[in-house]
Amino acid sequence: MDFYFLFVFVIASLLGFELINKVPPTLHTPLMSGSNAISGITVVGALICAENGNGFLAGAVAFLAIVFAMINVVGGYMVTDRMLGSFKRKEK
């Protein structure tokens, strides 16, 4: 059963990498906003798993999921804010 989860993880990682590389730059920022929403859901799910998990390994994996999802959320919002700032009028 563990091999199945590893297989799904590797396939999902490769598919995600290919999809991100195929996105044109004009669509990157709207997709980043959607990614922020998905990462927010990931944080909530990881918090639930951290609370209900049994053992050190479950807690450690949940902690890593929270850290990586929060990095994605904060970075995504910073990029989106910077991009939206480029459309503001310059003050003299």
Image: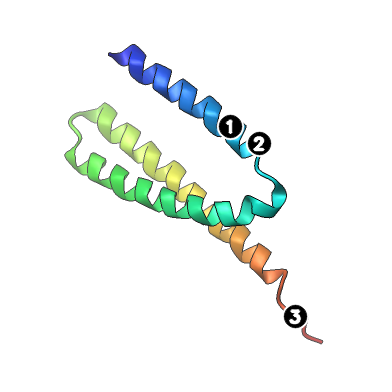
Q: x and y percent of residue 10 in the render? A: 47, 21
Which amino acid type is shown beneath numbered disc 1?
Phe
Residue in the image at 78% along x and 80% along y: 90
Dot 1 or dot 3, earlier in sequence: 1
* 2 or 3: mark nearer the eye: 2
Q: CA distance from mark 1 to mark 3?
A: 36 Å
Residue in the image at 70% along x and 54% along y: 26
Residue carrying label 2: 21
Residue carrying label 3: 89
Which amino acid type is shown beneath numbered disc 3?
Arg
Tag 2 secondary structure? helix
- Can you say which quadrant of the picture contains the N terminus? top left
User: Can you say whether 59 is above or below 43 in the image?
Assistant: above
- Can you say which quadrant of the picture contains the C terminus? bottom right
Disc number at residue 82? Answer: none
Q: Is 65 left or right of 50, judged from the image as shown?
A: right
Q: x and y percent of residue 48 in the render? A: 23, 45
Q: Are marks 2 and 1 in contact (CB under 8 Å)?
A: yes
